[in-house]
Amino acid sequence: MHTHPLLDTLRELELALQQPQRRSDPASMAALLHADFREFGRSGRCYDRASICAWLAEAGAEAQPHIWTQDFVLAQLAEDIALLTYRSAHLDADGMLSRHTNRSSLWQRGAAGWLLRFHQGTATEPFGPASR
């Protein structure tokens, strides 16, 4: 299957941000988040770069869920701005999905490469896993 190189790059960055060890390490997370990062979480809470890094670090790697992702779609809005949308869910040890969410990520390219500028999660109806 042929995909767009930028889609591949941003999908890999999204997947990196979902890894429990990275999520629990503030420096590792901050390296992929724009200085002006903001998030509107699935819960309705708002985060900035410092608060999301602190909140994830406080939870620790053991508390981080395994995340299933699928249906990535790229819209390149400018040479240095891209919108990535996808669906995610928490994946339990039995392979069951919960907390189904529509996701949107606005990525901005600068001197440090592609950084996540804005992220939003919106609860959605349950969906079945699709091939990635």
Image: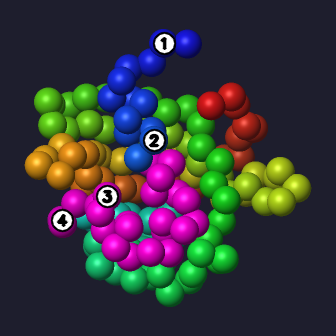
Circle 4 sits on which residue?
36
Circle 2 sits on which residue?
12
Indicate which disc residue 2 carries.
Answer: 1
Question: For this rendering, which residue is in front, 77 or 14?
Answer: 14
Part of the protein shown in magenta? 14-36
Spatial separation of the CA atoms under disc 4 and disc 1: 33 Å
The residue that appears at 71% across and 46% down in the rendered structure is: 126
Spatial separation of the CA atoms under disc 4 and disc 2: 21 Å
Residue type pointed to by label 3 = Leu
Q: Is residue 30 magenta?
A: yes
* Residue contact between numbered discs 4 and 2, judged by CB atoms under 8 Å: no
How are the colours assigned in the image? rainbow
Residue type pointed to by label 4 = Asp
SS at badge 3 = loop
| Quarter of the image where the N terminus is located | top right
The residue that appears at 26% across and 52% down in the rendered structure is: 115
Residue 18 rendering spot, x and y as whole percentages: 52, 57
Circle 3 sits on which residue?
32
Spatial separation of the CA atoms under disc 2 and disc 3: 12 Å
The answer to whether residue 52 of the structure is visible from this angle is yes
Circle nearer the viewer, 4 or 1:
1
Residue 38 rendering spot, x and y as whole percentages: 28, 65
Residue type pointed to by label 1 = His
Q: Earlier in the sequence, mark 1 or mark 3?
A: 1
Residue 123 located left or right of residue 30: right
As drawn, which residue projects farthest toward the bottom?
Answer: 58
Q: Earlier in the sequence, mark 4 or mark 1?
A: 1
Q: Earlier in the sequence, mark 4 or mark 2?
A: 2
Residue 13 located left or right of residue 131: left
Classed neighbour count for the residue bearing mark 3: other residues with Cα under 10 Å, few (<14), some (14–19), many (≥20): many
Q: Earlier in the sequence, mark 2 or mark 1?
A: 1
